Image (cartoon, rainbow, N blue to C red):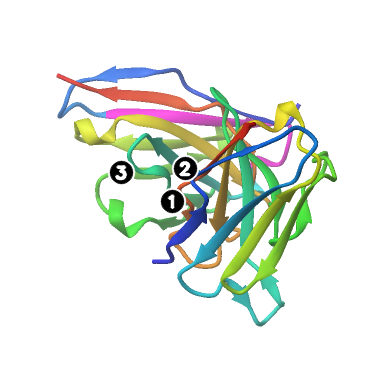
Amino acid sequence: EVQLVQSGAELKKPGESLRISCKGSGYNFATHWIGWVRQTPGKGLEWMGIIYPGDSRRKNNPSLQGQVTISADTSVSSVYLHWNSLKPSDSGIYYCARAQVYGDDAFDLWGLGTMVTVSS
Amino acid sequence: DIVMTQSPESLAVSLGERATISCKSSQSVLYSGNNKNYLGWYQQKPGQPPKLLIYWASYRESGVPDRFSGSGSGTDFTLTITSLQAEDVAVYYCQQYYSSPDSFGQGTKLEIK
């Protein structure tokens, strides 16, 4: 089955670090761009960035520059989103999603989401 | 950055009737090199991730019922649902993928009247 499986919900404190994951299966993982999309009640759907697992080329949302890092490991067919120091405003549901062919394509396959809660 | 604006914010339509959702981009998402509009439509039901319905503004994703259609070009786009079904209750989003960072509309909540 073609799918993206995301890691489980996280409850963290401000200032803590976090890495969430997204594992692809059922297709050639290395040759499809994978993006991250955040959903919050206040900002709706926010495109965070996208990575090509085959060579780790990335496009990031400049508004998030330095706040979060996207990486990939083709040996385990996974893409990651990493924070060094979480803030309460990082709370939300994080989806990984596969672009159809190229990095500038619609997302045709989505993970179920990882809920991140940052609270003291 | 390109700003996507949807209207209306919410919409109530009777079963079997037509629903129309508008999406406007702050600049054109039509690429002259291939004459494609870099615009997609998604459906999101409660507790689920978004689901791709339409890409390149008017191409229906595989498995999507033909009552869903997309139209428009440049900066003005429309998602039309003919003969609304109960299972179409959801929030609908447009997305531009013409220019990074990609951006989504704020969503349109579709309900049954």
Residue closer to the observer: B8 or A81: B8
The answer to whether marks 2 and 3 mark residues whose Cβ atoms lie closer than 8 Å is: no
Q: Residue at x 20, y 30 (%)?
A: A88
Q: Which of the numbered marks, if any, corresponds to residue A108?
A: none
Label 2, residues with CA under 10 Å away: few <14, some 14-19, many ≥20: many
Q: Residue at x 45, y 48 (%)?
A: B106
Report which residue position mark 1 lands on.
A49
As displayed, is residue B34 above or below residue B95?
A: below
Residues in magenta, as a range? A18-29
Residue closer to the observer: A15 or B24: B24
Counting the numbered discs, the total is 3
Check if residue A118 falls in the magenta segment. no
Residue A97, percent from left and from top:
57, 40
Is B59 on the left or on the right of B51, as rendered? Answer: right
Do marks 2 and 3 share a chain? yes
The answer to whether marks 1 and 2 mark residues whose Cβ atoms lie closer than 8 Å is: yes
Kindly report the distance in space between the C-alpha atoms of the residues bearing marks 1 and 3. 10 Å
Image quarter where the N terminus of chain A lies is top right
Do marks 1 and 3 share a chain? yes
Tell me the SS state at disc 1.
Answer: strand
Q: Chain of mark 2?
A: A
Report which residue position mark 2 lands on.
A36
Do marks 1 and 2 share a chain? yes
Is B65 on the left or on the right of B107, as rendered? Answer: right
Residue closer to the observer: A116 or B24: B24
Kindly report the distance in space between the C-alpha atoms of the residues bearing marks 1 and 2. 6 Å
Residue A62, percent from left and from top:
32, 59
Is A10 on the left or on the right of B15, as rendered? Answer: left
Q: Residue at x 41, y 39 (%)?
A: A38
Image quarter where the C terminus of chain A lies is top left
